[in-house]
Image (cartoon, helix red, strand yellow):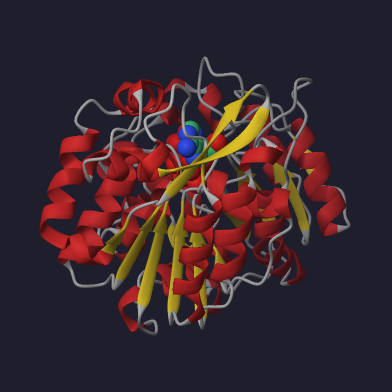
């Protein structure tokens, strides 16, 4: 992989700054609604604690001004439960109070510092050399002996705690980062035929993935669903109805043209839904292509599409999933997601990326994937052949 990992770090007795990504959905009371990302980092943190490290843990939660912009107090409590030892919470990130909390740590102890994004610089993007001159980095670099970046899900952000600290401190990839890079940087080595199931509502991202993997010859089949599938359906010449069209163009005004261009060039590899499901009088109603247009938005693929896509996975070498096939949050539109994602586990090797995609698996209790990425944007960046600033700076 060419970047230092925990195998290269002599931990015992050292103070280690550890960047994790525990950015999570919160409930109405601001408490953690899902702790999957906390679970993911337990291995790295436990290893560093067992090896005698004193850990200053850094993380962000939400975006300034957003509903999920919050303190990390609840995260510290939950991390303590998961690690079976108290994790101190400090309501400062790099002030004297935070630095004192770090200095007071004993071997095998950890403090979770406050949400890095409470400080404006941490929500800006900088080239690494400039990030290294920010206040957070300037104050924290002298009080840690090493830096471990385990925050794969934030690795596409060129922010101070991600790219600035490694410019000033010996730095290593944590176990989450290591495993994610291992899997997602080596897609071309996975078994064929390689099937990408692209659904969800981030249509532009799905087109980017489709274009990149088709251009690079990585994809043998692309199964389109969700709002992405609706756009392909429209691009294939079917009148899907105004409500579905409006939902698409609200997201991306040129979506249908982009889908048309992809169908023109790679049509034989791109599967388009053959039926959809809409809501009528509060009920799920299946509509075949012949029954379109309808005056309600298509919120799921229909049963025939789900069955046809499930068949494709029967003979797939690799399944790569990004974006749920329907509005899985509503039970009556979870059918496509349950069937298609459920069938994807029959591929020889299966990979899942995307925050909502992973949440849909947990919600629907679908298990058996070889790799469920903790990242959304970061995973997509790798799947489309891009580079991650966090990783580039670990190489230097
Ligand atoms: N046909 C559809 N119409 C509207 N929204 C959809 C449809 N299918 C899926 N979705 C929505 O897409 C959202 C997730 O998409 P996206 O953000 O692209 O996934 P991820 O976070 O995994 O990258 C879900 O909230 C789901 O309700
Ligand atoms: O949740 C995250 O990314 P994701 O939505 O791509 O999975 C990361 O924590 C990065 O957060 P950001 O997109 O607010 O920089």
* Position of residue 133 in the picture relative to residue 4 (left or right): left
* Position of residue 69 in the picture relative to residue 304 (left or right): right
* 207, 325: nearer the viewer: 325
* Position of residue 334 in the picture relative to residue 348 (left or right): right
Question: Where in the figure is residue 277, as x and y percent of width and height?
Answer: 53, 39
- The answer to whether 73 is drawn above or below residue 127 in the figure is above
Residue furthest front in the image = 290
Q: Quadrant of residue 395?
A: bottom left
- The answer to whether 338 is drawn above or below residue 257 in the figure is below
Question: Where in the figure is residue 11, as x and y percent of width and height?
Answer: 63, 70
Residue at (50% x, 48% y) in the render: 325
Residue at (33% x, 47% y) in the render: 206
* 337, 308: nearer the viewer: 308
Q: Is residue 149 visible?
A: no
Residue at (22% x, 41% y) in the render: 235
Quarter in which the C terminus is drawn: bottom left
Question: Where in the figure is residue 143, as x and y percent of width and height?
Answer: 56, 46
- The answer to whether 290 is drawn above or below residue 378 in the figure is above
- The answer to whether 160 is drawn above or below residue 262 in the figure is above
Q: How many marks?
A: 0
Q: Is residue 12 visible?
A: yes
Quarter in which the N terminus is drawn: bottom left
* 195, 74: nearer the viewer: 195
Residue at (34% x, 53% y) in the render: 272
Q: Quadrant of residue 392?
A: bottom left
Question: Where in the figure is residue 77, as x and y percent of width and height?
Answer: 83, 40
């Amino acid at each position: 992989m060419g970047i230092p990992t925990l195998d290269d770090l002599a931990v015992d007795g050292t103070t280690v700054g550890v960047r994790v990504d525990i950015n999570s959905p919160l409930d109405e009371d601001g408490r953690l609604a899902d702790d999957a990302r906390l679970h993911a980092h337990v291995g790295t943190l436990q290893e560093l604690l067992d090896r005698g490290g004193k850990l200053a843990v850094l993380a962000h939660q939400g975006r300034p001004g957003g509903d999920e912009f919050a303190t990390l107090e609840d995260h510290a409590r939950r991390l303590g439960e998961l690690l079976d030892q108290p994790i101190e919470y400090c309501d400062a990130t790099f002030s004297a109070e935070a630095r004192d909390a770090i200095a007071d740590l004993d071997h095998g102890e950890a403090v979770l510092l406050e949400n890095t994004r409470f400080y404006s610089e941490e929500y800006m993007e900088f080239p690494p050399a400039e990030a290294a001159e920010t206040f957070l980095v300037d104050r924290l670099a002298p009080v840690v002996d090493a830096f471990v970046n385990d925050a794969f899900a934030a690795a596409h952000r060129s922010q101070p705690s991600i790219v600035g600290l490694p410019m000033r401190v010996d730095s290593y990839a944590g176990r989450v980062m290591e495993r994610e890079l291992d899997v997602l940087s080596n897609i071309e080595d996975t078994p064929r035929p390689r099937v990408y199931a692209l659904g969800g509502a981030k249509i532009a991202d799905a087109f980017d993935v489709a274009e990149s993997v088709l251009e690079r010859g990585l994809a043998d089949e692309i199964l389109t669903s969700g709002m992405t599938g609706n756009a392909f359906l429209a691009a294939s010449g079917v009148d899907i109805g105004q409500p579905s069209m409006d939902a698409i163009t609200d997201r991306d005004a040129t979506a249908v043209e982009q889908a048309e261009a992809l169908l023109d060039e790679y049509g034989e590899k791109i599967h388009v839904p053959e039926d959809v499901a809409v809501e009528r009088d509060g009920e799920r109603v299946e509509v075949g292509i012949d029954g379109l247009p309808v005056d309600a938005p298509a919120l799921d693929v229909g049963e025939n599409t789900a069955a046809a896509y499930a068949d494709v996975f029967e003979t797939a070498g690799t399944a790569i999933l990004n974006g749920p096939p329907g509005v899985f949050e509503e039970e009556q539109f979870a059918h496509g997601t349950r069937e298609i994602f459920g069938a994807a586990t029959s591929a020889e090797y299966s990979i899942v990326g995307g925050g909502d995609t992973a949440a849909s698996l947990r919600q629907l209790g679908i298990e058996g994937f070889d790799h469920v990425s903790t990242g959304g944007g970061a995973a997509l960046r790798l799947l489309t052949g891009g580079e991650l600033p966090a990783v580039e700076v670990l190489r230097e």
